[in-house]
Image (cartoon, rainbow, N blue to C red):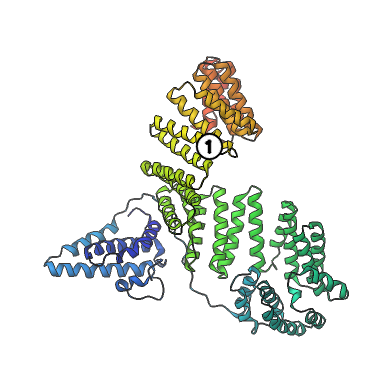
Amino acid sequence: MTGNEARALSLIEKHLRWLTHDGLNQEAHQEALAAFGLALDAVTRSGHGDTPVRGSDAAELAPLFGSRDGELTASQLAALCWARAEEIAEAFDRRNGTDAHARRLERTRALADEHYEVPLSSGGFTAPVAAPREWTPADRIVRARLLGALGTASSINAIADVLDDAGAADRVPLTFLLLRGLLAEDRLDDAAQVLPARLDALRAIGDGARADLEEKLGPALFGKDDAFAARALEEHPDAPLGVRAQLLTIVAYGHMIAGRLDEALRTAREARELHAQVGDIDRAHALAHTEADIHRGKEAPMDAIEVLDALLADDRLDVGRRVHVLTDRAILREALGDPSAGADDADEAARLLLTWDAEGPVVASALSLGAQFAERAGENERAVAGYRLAVQRLEAVGESTVALRYGLGRALLAAGAPHEAVEVIDEVLQDETAAGEAPGSRAITVGLLARAFEHAEEWGNALRAWEITADLHEEAEEPARRASALVALAQLLGRLGETDDSIETLTTAVEIARLDPDNRGMLADALHSLAQTKAYRGDDDALARLDEALEIGRADDAPWLVADLLDTRARFLANAGQVDEAVACALQAADGFLSVGGVPQAGGSELVAARILLGAERVEEAVAVLRSALEHAVEQEQLRQAVAIDLGDALESLGRHGEAAEVRSTLPA
């Protein structure tokens, strides 16, 4: 009724099995079935009637909906729910000699005509998992090569299934992938049996010299024994270029493992050039990719990205290699400060994997990577969608989704859906508890749940969750984290007007933080919060607590912390009437923020200084500070407007009306 059809579907999937909890209360069954039917009809009207309802094929639901080979769609399940509800209503009415239950169903059906647009969730429909497509022989070869390049669990079988039907030109790269996969699993006997098929393929394409030498060298040519490769290069100086390139590839990997990166790069380039000379584009691409890996090892990310960009621009790049390259570039882009571009690459990798029906865990990994990067870019709706689909993919193969659902809960909270986040995170916590997860791990989950409760304004639950978080960190012997949870608890108590309880809790947090000398930053944070709350209550020792935190920040060379504390100190001094000291402190805070790139924060501290000056009727001085603050607030619109308003008023009071009008013209109408 409220336009939240996707949310309704997720709730139905969560609660559908509740129909089996009580076999006697048929009236409750009628109500539930009618509610499900109403919601599923709304899903169908929204254009998603073909969406599978996860869990609808559960064996325990068979007495209600019949045995199923697969999941029911939303429209199918809606019809079954209404039909079952009508059967129950008819039985009641026949027994009672009335039509009351039938009329109740009609009233529920009539709700379909009522609509109130009330967005309640970030949820959207995920695309239904497509039925297995009909693969052509060429498709099956492409898919087998993709899985082989990815090294998935099913790759060996997938390649073996297409090998007999593939032409000689395709059998050459297929046997290479198959041999490499078998050797990675130490299946030496199986590799020996595959080698003849590769030799036949090489001879069939007219590369008999290479086949003869590969037969002599054996399956080791496809492994990672660099000592073997070095000997073979010495013993066969006239080896065919393709064999020499493969041996050089093994040597390059050996250099990489040993940390000889310059030698690895030189050898990889030589191998790539040889592969290119004989027209083996796939192996040339693989060696270029290896060069990118070496650049990463040399901490030269831009050089690595340049190589990866060139690979992705090549239309001949094999789809499996393209997935690898996209994933690597995604990680590099995120590390270089562009998480949105990283998410784009990860999502494109996931699209290719979905297109070629890769295994669920592999697809979920790419989707999860994209979701994490989208979170870091602040694209929270995108992150939610990625996590949802990743969860769906793992659930389809029966693998644990706890970590993904934790990410989903975190993304939902950031996307402004705290109530839904509470549900997801609470389920994660239940699963972790049932699995006997360590208390420190559960504490992190409960801490996220506490934040979700806060955003949902469920204050009692939030307070209790923070208490449990602190208790779990105590059990895990993590004093700094316990102190952090207590600070969060105290801050919430303060917001709720429980100042005395807040100070008591913060005092405990400070005492606990002192027990962990390796986390002095936590002690400074606890002292900062304690000082602010004491100042609010009017305690005389508030400034002393703040100065202790400042001493820690200066001793530990933490400029951001020091700047933040100086900003607070300026406010304390201003409240005490010490104008000059307060202004100096605020300007020191601004300089501190600027020294570590905190430009908007510097503008905020300058605004504090200016307002102290305005309060002391030192308007000329305030104007100078406000002009600096305005420059620093350019990228923070709310702060910029606040500064502009104060600056305009200050200029007006000085009779500088033209300047005031100019500043005010930058404000929204």
Q: Position of residue 23 (x, y in %)?
A: 25, 67
Relative placement, left or right, of 352 versus 118 is right
Quadrant of residue 159 within the rendered picture: bottom right
Where residue 448 sits: x, y (%)?
Answer: 47, 47
Look at the numbered disc 1 and give the secondary structure of its residue: helix
> Which residue, given by chain and number where applicable, does mark 1 sit on?
513
Residue 565 appears left or right of 60? right
Amino acid type at circle 1 is Ala
Q: Is residue 188 visible?
A: yes
Residue at image location 48% in from the left, 44% down from the top: 474
User: For this view, does 163 lie left or right of residue 214?
Assistant: left
Is residue 90 placed above or below 411 in the rendered structure? below
Q: Please identify the quarter of the rendering in which residue 256 is found.
A: bottom right
Counting labels gives 1
Q: Is residue 664 visible?
A: no
Q: Is residue 110 above or below residue 511?
A: below
| Dot 1 alpha-carbon crowd within 10 angstroms: few under 14, some 14 to 19, many 20 or more | many
